[in-house]
Image (cartoon, rainbow, N blue to C red):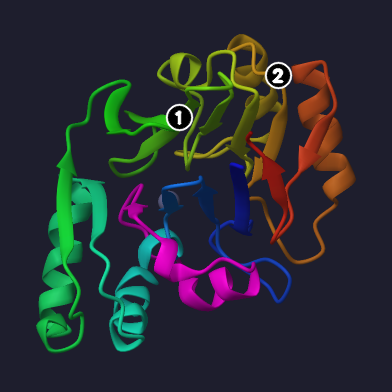
Amino acid sequence: MAKLVILGTSHAVPDENHENTHLAVVGDSRMVLIDGSGNPQVRMKKAGLDDERLTDIIMTHLHPDHVSGIPLLLMGMGLSRRERPLNVFAIEHCMEPMKKMLEWYEWDTWHFFPVHFHTLPEEDLHLVIDCDEFRLLTSPVKHFIPTIGVRVEFKKTGKVFAYSCDTAPTPSLIPLAKDADIFVHEAAGASVGHSSAAQAGEIAAQANAKSLYLIHYPTGGYNYQKLAEEAQATYGKPVIITEDFMEIDLS
Ligand SMILES: [Zn+2]
């Protein structure tokens, strides 16, 4: 059974109920972590996910609210005597500084298990993972720094999950989210490199997404009903506000 597990929902300023945005795609044979802030090992544990099953990490961009927890996760898994190899995928802008950061942490003294780094090209619908169960593709989106969104296509069921990541409205989102059953879009608010809920709704409608979930939204007592209504007005269908530890069926 495949599922999406929401490990955090907040924009860059989290609160006690909303960790920074990161997600896990949990399949039968592969488990993919998309970003990791805070301490992802603790978040996975709290969500009932065994980090020993983690096969792949996708780092979407080099902002600390997305990837600052990755060194901590690698350290925690190493010290937990993990032996299973792990793939780490990112575009060069994120990958090179992350590798340097791991060197500064002298990670060769604590990671112990094989980590394979794969630098991704910044091209639309680039095929990153092709396994028996699903295909995972990435496309550049429009943030302040180079950033990728993610699309996962399940082979047996035809089910599609898409994630905008941090982005302003941009044409590359349409093929990324085309006919997606589950489209998770950010709603940090209209500004350079981000989108409002209404803009997320517009993109979801243009992509013919079958459902829209908002994530990476403002915290601190924000009016979530208003956020959903703003997106519904442009999307034309009900919109769901993601919550930390929400599980969404992908089977
Ligand atoms: Zn960002």
Note whether 115 is above or below 121 in the view shown: below
Determine if residue 166 is in view.
yes
Quarter where residue 6 is shown? bottom right
Vertical placement of residue 182 versus 146, above or below? above
Q: Which residues are magenta?
A: 37-64
Residue located beneath label 1 in the image = 151
Task: Write the residue at 43% across / 47% down.
Answer: 29
* Marks 2 and 1 in Cβ contact (< 8 Å): no
- How packed mark 1 is, by other alpha carbons closer than 10 Å (few <14, some 14-19, many 20 or more), is many
| Residue underneath mark 2 | 210
Q: Position of residue 154 (x, y in %)?
A: 50, 27
Work out whether residue 216 can be spotted: no
Q: Position of residue 223 (x, y in %)?
A: 85, 52
Q: Amino acid at mark 2?
A: Lys
**Which residue is at 31% across, 77% downward?**
82
Q: Secondary structure at mark 2?
A: loop
Instruction: Return the residue nearer the eye: 245 or 84.
Output: 84
The quarter of the picture where residue 14 lies is bottom right
Q: Is residue 27 left or right of residue 145?
A: right
Looking at the picture, which amino acid does disc 1 mark? Arg
Q: Is residue 51 magenta?
A: yes
How dense is the environment of label 2, judged by Cα within 10 Å: few (below 14), some, or many (20 and up)?
A: some
